[in-house]
């Protein structure tokens, strides 16, 4: 049975430890919440803010941000209840203000994060108000809480991975790996997802196909591509993983909804989603993480797709 208090504490720790500065303002633009990294960037202590000695408002924060050297660090200021108002980051040592599309994506992301939190709160309140006395209902609600927490951790993990990549902390440790075994492990892990949709996953990779990659990162790529293939295919579909057209390449093939040509180049961008209603609980970060991992391996990823017929993702990794 999941321990709610412990999970909330863990979530609070995640947010506090994120390598992104998060600041939350109330409608009067007073700072009401913050995490550790924002203090570090702004060069103020947690205690300073706690005592409210600074009496900080969002305008002052913006002035402070302007004075801070952001060549190595990144700060995101979220202003509530409005959407993210000002987002600054460093890019090749020059300061840029990120485009509106990205601002909106951050807003969407906070929305995605808030949804499972609201659901968990409603379920927990119902339990406290009496549902806990009915063992059947209590167990159903706890199961729902558990899956909402899984969804939340997926989103937070995606965010953490993307910040690690951006901070250059995801360097691969490559070794020779047997592709068939890696694919088999991924299939085993994703079997529950596949079963829910009566999806068949076929591992048709050659027995002795060796691939030179970082185990954890290759697993991430394979799992993510198979997970997407399940997610974006109708019930009863078949997904095939097989050797690619040249040595060192492999292909993940589905018979799903497909992707229209105008979206094909964009799906590897951070937060890009073709149709949000079809990607509930997803962040739009999956393929950008996959692409970043493949770039780190000096490989490439290609996608071919026909709307309504299916998609094929081919991963090419250097063989040495
Ligand atoms: P998400 O978290 O939304 O799945 P991804 O970065 O993994 O984000 O994918 C970006 C978008 O690309 C998805 O929202 C979906 O629209 C599209 N997509 C990815 N894989 C597939 C696929 N196998 N079939 C159809 N569409 C896909």
Image: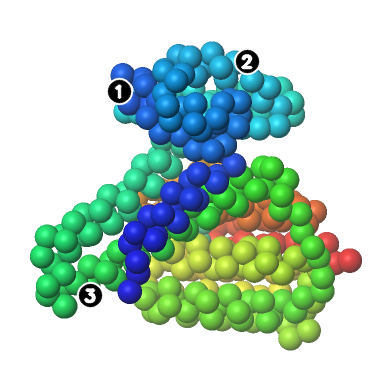
Q: Which residue is mark 3?
A: 139
Q: Residue at x 55, y 46 (%)?
A: 17
| Crowding near the residue tagged with mark 3, few <14, some 14–19, many ≥20 C-alpha atoms within 10 Å | some
Q: Is 159 situated left or right of 275 in this image?
A: right
Answer whether residue 148 is visible to the viewer in this image. Answer: no
Q: Which mark is residue 27?
A: 1
User: Percent position (x, y) of residue 266?
Assistant: 56, 43
Answer whether residue 235 is visible to the viewer in this image. Answer: yes
Q: Please identify the residue farthest to the right as the structure is shown.
A: 320
Query: Is 81 placed above or below 313 here?
Result: above
Query: Of marks 1 and 3, which one's residue comes earlier in the chain?
Result: 1
Q: Are the residues tagged 1 and 3 within 8 Å (C-beta)?
A: no
Mark 1, secondary structure of its residue? loop
Query: Of marks 2 and 3, which one's residue comes earlier in the chain?
Result: 2
Q: Which residue is mark 2?
A: 67
Mark 2, secondary structure of its residue? helix
């Amino acid at each position: 049975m999941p321990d709610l208090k412990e999970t909330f504490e863990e979530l609070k720790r995640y947010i506090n430890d994120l390598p992104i500065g998060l600041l939350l303002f109330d409608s009067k633009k007073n700072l009401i919440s913050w995490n550790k990294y924002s203090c570090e960037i702004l060069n103020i202590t947690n205690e300073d803010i706690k005592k409210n000695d600074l009496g900080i408002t969002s305008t002052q924060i913006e002035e402070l941000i302007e004075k801070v050297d952001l060549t190595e660090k990144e700060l995101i200021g979220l202003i509530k209840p409005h959407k993210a108002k000002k987002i600054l980051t460093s890019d090749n040592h020059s300061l840029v203000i990120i485009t509106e599309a990205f601002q909106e994506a951050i807003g969407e992301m906070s929305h995605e994060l808030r949804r499972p939190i609201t659901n968990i709160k409603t379920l927990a309140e119902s339990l406290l108000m009496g549902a806990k006395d009915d063992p059947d209902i209590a167990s159903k609600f706890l199961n729902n809480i558990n899956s909402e927490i899984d969804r939340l951790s997926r989103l937070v993990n995606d965010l953490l991975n993307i910040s690690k990549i951006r901070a250059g902390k995801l360097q691969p440790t490559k070794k020779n790996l047997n592709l068939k075994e890696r694919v088999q492990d991924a299939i085993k892990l994703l079997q529950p997802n596949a079963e829910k949709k009566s999806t068949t996953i076929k591992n048709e990779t050659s027995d002795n196909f060796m691939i030179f990659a970082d185990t954890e990162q290759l697993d991430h790529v394979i799992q993510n591509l198979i997970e997407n293939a399940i997610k974006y295919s109708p019930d009863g579909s078949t997904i095939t993983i097989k050797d690619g057209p040249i040595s060192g390449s492999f292909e993940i093939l589905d018979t799903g909804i497909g992707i229209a040509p105008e979206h094909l180049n964009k799906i590897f961008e951070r937060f890009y989603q073709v149709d949000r209603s079809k990607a509930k609980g997803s962040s739009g970060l999956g393929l950008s993480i996959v692409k970043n991992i493949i770039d780190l391996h000096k490989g490439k990823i290609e996608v071919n797709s026909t709307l309504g017929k299916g998609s094929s993702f081919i991963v090419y990794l250097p063989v040495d």
